[in-house]
Amino acid sequence: MITSQQKQIHTTISELFEDSKYDKLKIMKSAAKSVFRAMQPLDFKNAYLSISKEQGEDLVKLITDNKLKNSVEFGTSFGISTLFLAQGVIETGGHIITTELIESKAQKAIENFERAGVSELIEVRVGDAMETLKNHDKPIDLLLLDGWKDLYLPLFQMLEPNFHSHTIIYVDNADMKETKTFLETIGENSTYQLQPKFNGKVVLITIKK
């Protein structure tokens, strides 16, 4: 039976996906600027850059099946992926820390979390993730990497002391050039195993038992 809170989250996610349907046009406009200079996060301040609905549902299942509680997300955007995380941690009694570089996006995400009725489950940190997460010293059950790709490796290495034998690292945009470089580096470490999903768009990193 779907609870009123779950219905509230579903409704908010559906509304955000509807709003995100013009993302491709926004991304194309942003990419056009890179003809003259390198792309920057601010170029995408109006774009969702969201995971798909199928990925989101898979994330919820990943959390509930593995009883994951403490989630850390790199790249909040407007909060679609965070709301899927919230659906999962409601079931496991968990909590989410999410970080977003662009303040206007973070503020909109906070509004979306309030609308979905899950604000108490989510701590939003605004700024460079290398700063907002640098003092993190609690175990991480799930790390979702879905921000600026150049930061995947340094952020992974900075948070690595908080990983444990059941930690799962969910890597989105795994088929992008910068992410492939990151995954090649991690793959050289015998501690980890990599599992592609969604035709290589996603890779799960787990600790070898």
Image (cartoon, helix red, strand yellow):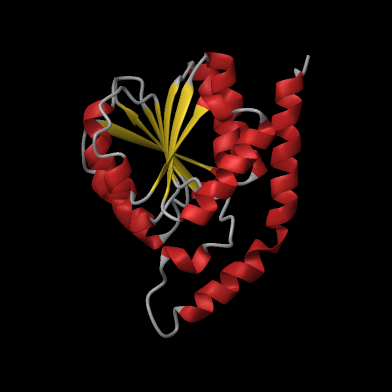
x and y, in percent, of residue 61 in the image? 58, 25
Which residue corresponds to the image point at 31% horizontal and 53% vertical from the top-left?
151
Question: Could you say which is closer to the camera, residue 194 or residue 50?
Answer: 50
Which residue corresponds to the image point at 21% horizontal and 38% vertical from the top-left?
189
Instruction: Please indicate whether residue 9 sits to the left or right of residue 107 in the image.
Output: right
Which residue corresponds to the image point at 75% horizontal and 51% vertical from the top-left?
18
x and y, in percent, of residue 92 in the image? 53, 15
State the count of labels: 0
Which residue corresponds to the image point at 69% horizontal and 31% vertical from the top-left?
9
Q: Is residue 187 visible?
A: no
Quadrant location of residue 209? top left
Above or below — where is 69 with respect to 198? Answer: above
x and y, in percent, of residue 203 in the image? 44, 42
Question: Could you say which is closer to the camera, residue 106 or residue 170?
Answer: 106
Farthest bottom residue in view: 36
Above or below — where is 107 with respect to 29? Answer: above
